[in-house]
Image: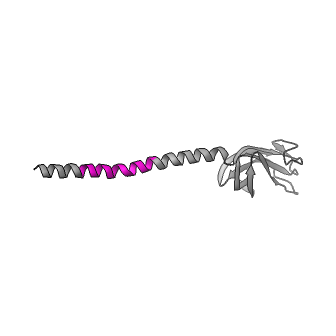
Amino acid sequence: MLRYDLTRIARAGLLAGVLALPACGKKDSANTAETGSAATSTNAVRVTAVNVGRGLGADKRLSDQTQQFRPTDVIYAVVETQGSGQNADLQARWTYEDGQLVDEASRSISANGNDVTEFHISKPSGWPKGKYKVEVLLNGSSAGSKDFTVK
C-alpha cells in the first residue's frame, strides 16, 4: 500500500513539473516579446502628420497649406515621419466623395529621424467639385488621413 502511494505521489509531482515547464517558457517568451516590441516601437518609423496644400518648397514641405482647392490645382500631400527603418512602405490613397478611388501611389522610404515624403495628384481637365480624402498607409496599415474640398 505504501509503495502504491509513493508511486502515485511521484507521478503527480512529475505531472505537475511537466505542466509547469511550458508555462515558464511562455512567461519568458512573453517578457522577451514585450521588451522587444517596446524597444522597437520607440525607434520604428511612424507617421506624425498628414497635410495637404497647393505648393511645395525646396524642402518638400508645403508652401501653401489649405484644405480648399480649385478644380485645376495640383494637390499635394506631405507626410511627416519620425523614427528609423529601412524600406518602410508609405502609400497615399486618394478618394472622392463615397470612397471612389482617384489615385494610389507608394514610396519605399528609409527613414532616420524626422523626414517628409510628398505625394501629389493633378488633372489638367479639372477635378470634379466635391469632398476628397487622402489616406496614408504605413506598411499596409492606416497611419493618418486628411479631408479636403474642391470648389
- Position of the C terminus, as image quadrant, is top right
Q: Can you give x and y, in whole percent of width and height, for residue 34 in the image?
A: 54, 45
* Residue 95 visible within the image: no
Q: Can you give x and y, in whole percent of width and height, for residue 140 in the image?
A: 65, 55
Q: How is the image coloured?
A: one colour
User: What secondary structure prevails in the magenta region?
Assistant: helix
The residue shown at (39%, 52%) is: 22
Inspect the magenta stretch and tell me whether residue 86 lies in it: no
Image-based side of 11 in relation to 23, left or right? left
Image-based side of 126 in relation to 45, left or right? right
The residue shown at (22%, 51%) is: 10
Camera-nearest residue between 99 and 75:
75
Q: Can you give x and y, in whole percent of width and height, for residue 131 in the image?
A: 76, 46
Q: Count all numbered tags in the image, as a single digit.
A: 0
Give, as a single range, the part of the protein colored magenta: 11-27
Inspect the magenta stretch and tell me whether residue 18 lies in it: yes
The residue shown at (72%, 54%) is: 90
* Residue 149 visible within the image: yes
Image-based side of 80 in relation to 123, left or right? left
Camera-nearest residue between 65 and 19:
19
Image-based side of 148 in relation to 12, left or right? right
Placement of 103 over or under 60, stated as above or below:
below
Camera-nearest residue between 34 and 98:
34
Q: Can you give x and y, in whole percent of width and height, for residue 89 in the image?
A: 70, 56
